[in-house]
Image (spheres, helix red, strand yellow):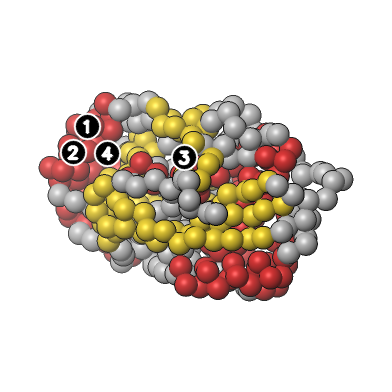
Amino acid sequence: MQVLKERQTFPIEEIAFKVENLLLKEPLRIANENYKSSKTVFVSIKAKGFKGIGESAPDKEVTNEDFHSVSRFIEKANSELKGRNSFDIQGINQEMDKLSKVDSSAKAGIDIALYDLIGKISKRNVASLLGGKGNSKPISVTIGIENEKLSVKHARLYKRLGFKVIKLKVGLDVDADIKRVASIRKEIGNSVKLVADANQGYTFKEAQFFLSNAEAFNLGFLEQPVNFPDFNSLKRLKEGSNIPIMADESVKSIEDLRMLIDMNAVSMINIKLMKMGGITKAIKIANEARSKNIGVMLGCMEESRVGIAAGMHLSLSVNDIGFADLDAHLSHTNRFVYGGLKTVNGKNVIGKGYGLGLKFKKGLFN
C-alpha cells in the first residue's frame, strides 16, 4: 500500500458533524442486541474549498460509545486539529490518540473524511491512494436470528440475487442454530459459502457443541463464539475443531491482535473501521495479521454507505481478502448520502468519483 505524499498544504478549516438515525427495513436480531434503527454521526472536513466525508457509527456493546460521546470528541478535535495539514494523516491520528485513548468510531469518522478529502484534492479515489486495484469485491449478506423457515426463505433469496457468502447470526439457542444451519445448507447447496457469527452468545460448552454438529454442513468459520475477553476458550475451540475460529469483538486494537497471535488462539480476525479507529490503523492491523498467516475479513457495524464505501476501498488495497462483510447499507430505508458504490450480483462495486465518490443529501451540511 502506498504512503500518502503531498508537498502542498491543505490546512483543516473545520470539522463538522451531524447525528442522524438510520432506519432498518426489518429488525436485525443478534445474540447481544436487537436493532430497529441505529444512530450514526456523519463527519465533514473542509480545506481550501474541498470537503471530505466520513462517518462514525458507535456501538455501546463493541466500541463503548454513543452519539453523545462521538459528538463531544469531534467538537474537541475540531478545536485541536484546525490548521493541521490534512495530508498529515499519521500525525493527525497521533494527535487524536493524545486527545483520547478510546473513542475509536469517532476517530474513524475523522480518519475516513481525511482520506476522502485527500482523494478529492488529488483527483484520485481512496483505493488508488492506498495502492489498491480493481473496483469490485464479493461480499457476504447477513441473516439475523430468526425462525428456521424465515432463515431458509432469506437464504433462497440471497442465493438468487447472486451472493456467494451468507453469514448466519447465531448464539441464542444452540439447538435451533444447528437446525437452521442444516436447513439452509440443504436449501442452498454447496455453491454458496455459509458462515456463522455468534456475537459472544455461547458458553464454551455450547460453542463446542455447535462446532461438533456444524462440521457436517461445511461451515466456513464461526465468528466470536464466546465473550470477548475469553481468549483461552477461543484457543481451546480452535484446537478442537476443523472449523476456523474468527475473532471480532476480541480484537479491537493491534495489542489484542498480538495477544491472540502469541496464544495461537484464532485462525481469522474481523477488522472493522469503527472499532479500529479508521483506515490508517486498520491497514496496520491487517498487514500484521497477514504477516502472521491470520486470515482477514473486513466487516462493518450498522453504518451507512459512507462507512461501507470506506471499507470497500480498503478491501481493494489489502492482499488476500477474498470477500468482505460489507452489507449494512442494504438494510436501510432512508439515505443521507448518495453515490460511492452499488451492489450487483453479490458484489460491491465502487464508483468512478474521486475520494470515496460520495455526496451528502442536500441540506445535510450547510
Q: CA distance from mark 4 to mark 2?
A: 15 Å
**Residue identifier under label 2:** 152
Query: Which residue is painted at 78% across and 51% down in the image?
Result: 10
Chain-order first, disc 3 or disc 4: 4
Question: Callout 4: 10 Å neighbours few (<14), some, many (20+)?
Answer: some
Q: CA distance from mark 4 to mark 1?
A: 16 Å
Question: Callout 3: 10 Å neighbours few (<14), some, many (20+)?
Answer: few
The amino acid type found where label 3 is placed reads: Tyr
Q: Left or right: 356 with respect to 224?
A: right
Q: Does residue 272 sit above or below 34 in this rendering?
A: above
Q: Secondary structure at mark 1?
A: helix
Q: Are marks 3 and 4 in contact (CB under 8 Å)?
A: no
Q: Are marks 2 and 1 in contact (CB under 8 Å)?
A: yes
Q: Position of residue 125 (x, y in %)?
A: 64, 35
Query: Which residue is painted at 38% across and 30% down in the image?
Result: 346
Q: Left or right: 103 with respect to 327?
A: right
Chain-order first, disc 1 or disc 3: 1
Q: Nearer the viewer, residue 47 or 198?
A: 47
Q: Nearer the viewer, residue 258 or 80?
A: 80
Q: Position of residue 19 (x, y in %)?
A: 45, 62
Q: CA distance from mark 1 to mark 3?
A: 29 Å
Q: Nearer the viewer, residue 230 or 116?
A: 116
Q: Left or right: 154 with respect to 229?
A: left
**Residue identifier under label 1:** 156
Chain-order first, disc 4 or disc 1: 1
The amino acid type found where label 2 is placed reads: Val
Discs 3/2, front = 3
The amino acid type found where label 4 is placed reads: Phe
Residue 124 visible in the snapshot: yes
Count of numbered labels shown in the rendering: 4
Q: Secondary structure at mark 3?
A: strand
**Residue identifier under label 4:** 217
